Structure formats: structure tokens, C-alpha cells
Image: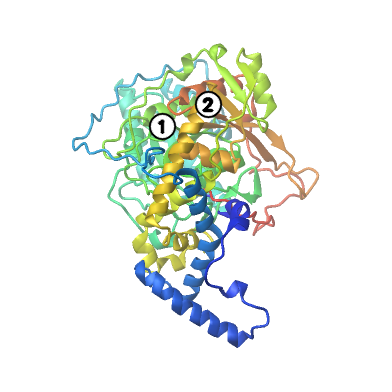
């Protein structure tokens, strides 16, 4: 669900106040090695007193010194920024915390009575002879083949299982292939259709789940060495919804370890468009598998960039829905006020179909709710006013304008300068609460990337409660300002700009990730390589207006075919081989949860 603090560090490092103590990194160069060793020991001994007051003396000396350094460089500047925003006057009359408590004991109705979308009809689609062509068909096309008896669900399962097994050794995108379950569910889907029972557009369609989503009798590893043999006897709400819609689970797909970036206990997931690159973002498996035609669609999650980043890198159409639109029971939680589940698909039409199946009130998720979306297939886009930012891809702007949309230059304005810090405090405090035992027991020492959760969560241990609440008040101020500024029906802008990722997730606004083209890769291995860098943009809408972003993306995709392109995983081009390990440098980390 995550991506690191680099940008925050660059922004805030100069503002970091002096601490009363000096640590090893600032020790005088004249000190001898022995003097530094004694100084470090003395520093750590003094720090133990402070850590003991926080019941955190389980840290070793080096960890305490690292944590003090992290507090100086990151925590304290964020604390001061939030304090300046919301704590300059007394009485708490302004900027209430965005944390919400509901004291109601009884569950609301589990039945979602929102009207279902009216999907476009498909006719005349014939079964391709080539399995490759089948693998890249849309949900509606595959459904038409099933309903016209040109193919069975079991036959589709066979096609996609074959592809999962064929490409996973290179892409490292699949944790568990659920073969027995897939054939069982496919057989049931075929039998129901034979009886005249049609569960809807997902009936008999294979798909994959990010491996933080629990499925009974199968491992739910959370991508982590610590939990790689974990089997949870829990049916996640989203899995229940898809099962009820007749969809067929073929695989548990890679999540970055504990939903952070693309490194997991089995390796690091690669981008099918350029296998020297990694996917970036913890919904690595859903993005790579959808792009490579290993599944027709997949469910991923985002806390801070883990849908948007890998979807953009792998060139697939994806939706990060409004916060609360999809229930999260049975899903590993990073942050209860930020986590969202959403679809990776071939097209915006497919995203609408999947969203329609999984949205609604989850009785065991206090943040989920019935969101009464209009039908995206019935939206009159000529009545919309859509803004575009300076970083918008102008092809999208021009196409929408040609479709009758009123396009206007736009800037989303707000005064809160610490959006990145607010997000990090929110996410990291929640995450540490969920994995307190993991840290205290020292299991974080076996984590796959020590510069990720272990470093962040040790620093989080010393965030004062009062300053966490100030960050939530600052978040409330940000939400109010964005709402006031959002004077258009939607806007077009970069989907992976870190500031927009932070603000969008803090506000809970939906965004469509839209493929808009390709570029040559830098330093290609040969002139004839078919590898590409994907180009994408985002279409953002206000919360509870996912249908607007979907409708605009569908309008764009009716006259373009970027979303229909296939990555060159079978034919990289002359004199172009798969490097192992990849030669591409790993870029500096940005937090992508």
C-alpha cells in the first residue's frame, strides 16, 4: 500500500532544530575512534532513560541512536509544522481532528441498495484462435464468449493458469497459484450458467488478489518473511463480494513486504514493459499480472501510492476509489483512515464493472459505507467542467475537449504545507499499532528492506500522542481547503506526483490512472528493443464521484488504444536478452504504501 521519506527529508531537513545532544554522525572529526566509541556508549546510555519512559527500551544502542537521528531530521520538523498550522490558539474551537468515532452498537444493513450500473452490451465477439488474444480480452468480451458457449470458465482458467506459471519466473509477481480453488469455482460457474443462472458480468471470469487479502485454506503471506507460512481462516469481504458475483480466483499476487513498495520475501517484481525496471509500489503483483495478460483483472490496495505508482509503471488502467467505497474486513491494515482497495484492469469499463461488484457497506469495517454513485455509463460528459493542471498530459485534455467537455486551466490550492508529514504520521502511527508485537519481538530484523518499515517504525515509537492529534487536526484543515478549492467536476493531472498522492489519500478522493502512450527507454540494450516506458496521467474527482472519473476515462479510451497495447514479454527484440539480475539502478525510495 506504500512508497520513503526522501522528499520529506529534503524539504524539512534544513528546518530541523538542534537537539540537546550530539550523536555519532555529528561527532567532531578530531575525536579518535576509541573516543567516538565511548561517546556512542555514553549517548546510548542516556537515551535509554528516555526510551524506558516510552516502554521502548527493547531497542539496542544502534537502533536508539538511529531513532534519535530520525526524530531530529523528520519527526520534529513535522511536529513543528503541524503545531504552527493548528495549535497557535487555545480552546480547540477550530480544525477538529479528522478521526471519527461512531458509538452506534448495532450494525447497519449489510445489503447495499445502491442501483447497479447499466453495462454496455457486447455482441458478435468470436473466440480467437490464439490464446494470447484471449488473454488480453476485456471482461465483457470474455463474458460474451462464456454466455455464447464459445468457451467455458474452466477453459479460461486453464489459459490464465498457464500464463501465470509461464511468466512468473521472470516477473516474480505471483505468491500462490490457487489452482484447485480456481477449477472448483469455474466448474460451479459453468454449472450455474447451464441452469440458466447468471450472476452478472464477472460470472466465470478469472482474477487475482493482492496477497494481503485473506482467503481460507490458502496462505496470506503479506509478502513478508515473518508471515510467509501464514494461513488465515478468514474470508475477506472483497473476496466474498467477488465470489458472489461469480468471479474465479486464480492467484494470490505479490504485495511488497507488509504492503510497502515492491520487495517481498520471494524477490522483487518486475515491470512487463521493461523487465530491467521494478514495478514500484506494493500492489506490484496486481499491476504486473494485469499488464502481462496473466489475469483479466486484479484487486490491489493503496495507503499512499500503491495503486497509482505500479499502475502507472506497468501501463494499466486502475482506479483508486473513494475512501470507504470498498470494505476491508480480512485485509491487512496499514492505516485505517487511509487504506483503500481498488481494481487493476484492461480499461475503464472493466474498472467500473469490478467497482460495481465490490462496493458497498461492509458490516465489520467501520469506515466503509454505501456510496450512491451515479451510473458512469449514463454520465453526460458535455455537462461537465474539467480542470487540467500544468502537469496534465495534453492529449487527454484535447480528446476530452473534442468530446464536448468544458476544459479549463486549474490549480488545486490549499495553505497546508505539511501534507507529506501529515500522511507519514497518520500512516506510521497506525502501522506501528498494528505491528507493535512484531517490532517488540525483534522480528523486524528479518524484514526484506531495512530502510523501509523497520526504520520508519522505530522513529514512530517516539511520536508524542498530542502531536499525532495535531497532525489529524491539520489533516482536517487540509480536507476543508481542498473541498473549497475543488470548483470543477474533475481535474486531469500527474497520477504519481508525490504531493498529489499524499493530498489525494488524505482527502480520500478517487483517481483513475490512465495510460496515454509510451516513450523510449533510456540507454536501450539495442536499437530494435521493444521495451518501453509507459506514460500515464490521472483523472481526479471529488470523493463519492468515482463515476465522473470513470466516465471521463471511458470517453478518452473510446478514441485511443494506448490501454490495448501488450508488453513485449515474449519478444523483446533482436539482440535484447533478459538481464539477471537487472542492470537498472534502483531509484531513491519514495514512500509508496
Vertical placement of residue 206 versus 398, above or below: below
Q: Secondary structure at mark 1?
A: helix
Viewer-proximal residue, 89 or 423?
89
Vertical placement of residue 224 versus 239, above or below: below
Q: Are marks 2 and 1 in contact (CB under 8 Å)?
A: no
Sequence-wise first label, 2 or 1: 1
Vertical placement of residue 132 versus 436, above or below: above
Task: Check disc 2 and report the residue beneath it.
Answer: 486
The percent coordinates of residue 208 (x first, y second) are: 44, 41
Viewer-proximal residue, 577 or 273?
273
Task: Check disc 1 and report the residue beneath it.
Answer: 153
Q: Secondary structure at mark 2?
A: loop
Residue lying at 53% horizontally and 63% vertically, measured from the top left: 72
- Can residue 203 be seen here? The reply is no
Viewer-proximal residue, 480 or 295?
480
Q: How many angstroms separate mark 2 from mark 1 (CA)?
A: 44 Å
The percent coordinates of residue 315 (x first, y second) are: 61, 37
The quarter of the picture where residue 14 lies is bottom right
The percent coordinates of residue 219 (x first, y second) are: 36, 53
Viewer-proximal residue, 576 or 505?
505
Amino acid at each position: 500500500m506504500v512508497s520513503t521519506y526522501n522528499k520529506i527529508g529534503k524539504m524539512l531537513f534544513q528546518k530541523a532544530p538542534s537537539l540537546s545532544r550530539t550523536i555519532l554522525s555529528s561527532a567532531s572529526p578530531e575525536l579518535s575512534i576509541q573516543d567516538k566509541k565511548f561517546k556512542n556508549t555514553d549517548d546510548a546510555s542516556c537515551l535509554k532513560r528516555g526510551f524506558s519512559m516510552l516502554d521502548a527500551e527493547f531497542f539496542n544502542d544502534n537502533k536508539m541512536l538511529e531513532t534519535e537521528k530520525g526524530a531530529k531530521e523528520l519527526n520534529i520538523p513535522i511536529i513543528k509544522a503541524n503545531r504552527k498550522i493548528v495549535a497557535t490558539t487555545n480552546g480547540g474551537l477550530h480544525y477538529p481532528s479528522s478521526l471519527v468515532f461512531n458509538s452506534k452498537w448495532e450494525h447497519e444493513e449489510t445489503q447495499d441498495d445502491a442501483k447497479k450500473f447499466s453495462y454496455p452490451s457486447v455482441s458478435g465477439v468470436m473466440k480467437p484462435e490464439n490464446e494470447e488474444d484471449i488473454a488480453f480480452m476485456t471482461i465483457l468480451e470474455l463474458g460474451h464468449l462464456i454466455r455464447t458457449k464459445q468457451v467455458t470458465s474452466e477453459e479460461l482458467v486453464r489459459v490464465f493458469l498457464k500464463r501465470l506459471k509461464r511468466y512468473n519466473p521472470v516477473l516474480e509477481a505471483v505468491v500462490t497459484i490457487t489452482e484447485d480453488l480456481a477449477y472448483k469455482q469455474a466448474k460451479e460457474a459453468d454449472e450455474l450458467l447451464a441452469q440458466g443462472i447468471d450472476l452478472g458480468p464477472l460470472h466465470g471470469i478469472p482474477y487475482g488478489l493482492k496477497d494481503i487479502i485473506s482467503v481460507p485454506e490458502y496462505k496470506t503471506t503479506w509478502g513478508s518473511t515473518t508471515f510467509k507460512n501464514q494461513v488465515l481462516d478468514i474470508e475477506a469481504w472483497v473476496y466474498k463480494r467477488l465470489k458472489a458475483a461469480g468471479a474465479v480466483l486464480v492467484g494470490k499476487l505479490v504485495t511488497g513486504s507488509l504492503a510497502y513498495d515492491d520487495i517481498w520475501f520471494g524477490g522483487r517484481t518486475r515491470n512487463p514493459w521493461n523487465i530491467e525496471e521494478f514495478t514500484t509500489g506494493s500492489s506490484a503483483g496486481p499491476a504486473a499480472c494485469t499488464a502481462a495478460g496473466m489475469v483479466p483483472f486484479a484487486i490491489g490496495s493503496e495507503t499512499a501510492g500503491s495503486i497509482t505508482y505500479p499502475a502507472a509503471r506497468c501501463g494499466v488502467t486502475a482506479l483508486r476509489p473513494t475512501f470507504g467505497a470498498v470494505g476491508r474486513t480480512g485485509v491487512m491494515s496499514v492505516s485505517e483512515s487511509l487504506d483503500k482497495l481498488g481494481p487493476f484492469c484492461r480499461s475503464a469499463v472493466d474498472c467500473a464493472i469490478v467497482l460495481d461488484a465490490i462496493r458497498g457497506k461492509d458490516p465489520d469495517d467501520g469506515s466503509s459505507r454505501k456510496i450512491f454513485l451515479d451510473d458512469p455509463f449514463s454520465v453526460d460528459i458535455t455537462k461537465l467542467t474539467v480542470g487540467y493542471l500544468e502537469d496534465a498530459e495534453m492529449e487527454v485534455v484535447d480528446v476530452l475537449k473534442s468530446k464536448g467537455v468544458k476544459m479549463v486551466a486549474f490549480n488545486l490550492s490549499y495553505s497546508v504545507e505539511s501534507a507529506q508529514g501529515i500522511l507519514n504520521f497518520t500512516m506510521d502511527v497506525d502501522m506501528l499499532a498494528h505491528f507493535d508485537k512484531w517490532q517488540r519481538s525483534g522480528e523486524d530484523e528479518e524484514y526484506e528492506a531495512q530502510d523501509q518499515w523497520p526504520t520508519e517504525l522505530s522513529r514512530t515509537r517516539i511520536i508524542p500522542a498530542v502531536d499525532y492529534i495535531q497532525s489529524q487536526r491539520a489533516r482536517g484543515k487540509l480536507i476543508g481547503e481542498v473541498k473549497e478549492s475543488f470548483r470543477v467536476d474533475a481535474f486531469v493531472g500527474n497520477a504519481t506526483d508525490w504531493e498529489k498522492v499524499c493530498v489525494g489519500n488524505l482527502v480520500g478522493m478517487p483517481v483513475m490512472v490512465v495510460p496515454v502512450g509510451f516513450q523510449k527507454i533510456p540507454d536501450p540494450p539495442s536499437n530494435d528493443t521493444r521495451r518501453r516506458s509507459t506514460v500515464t496521467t490521472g483523472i481526479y474527482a471529488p470523493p463519492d464521484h468515482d463515476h465522473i472519473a470513470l466516465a471521463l476515462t471511458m470517453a478518452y479510451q473510446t478514441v485511443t488504444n494506448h490501454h490495448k497495447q501488450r508488453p513485449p514479454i515474449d519478444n523483446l527484440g533482436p539482440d535484447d536478452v533478459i538481464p539477471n539480475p537487472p542492470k537498472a539502478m534502483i531509484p531513491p525510495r519514495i514512500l509508496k504504501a
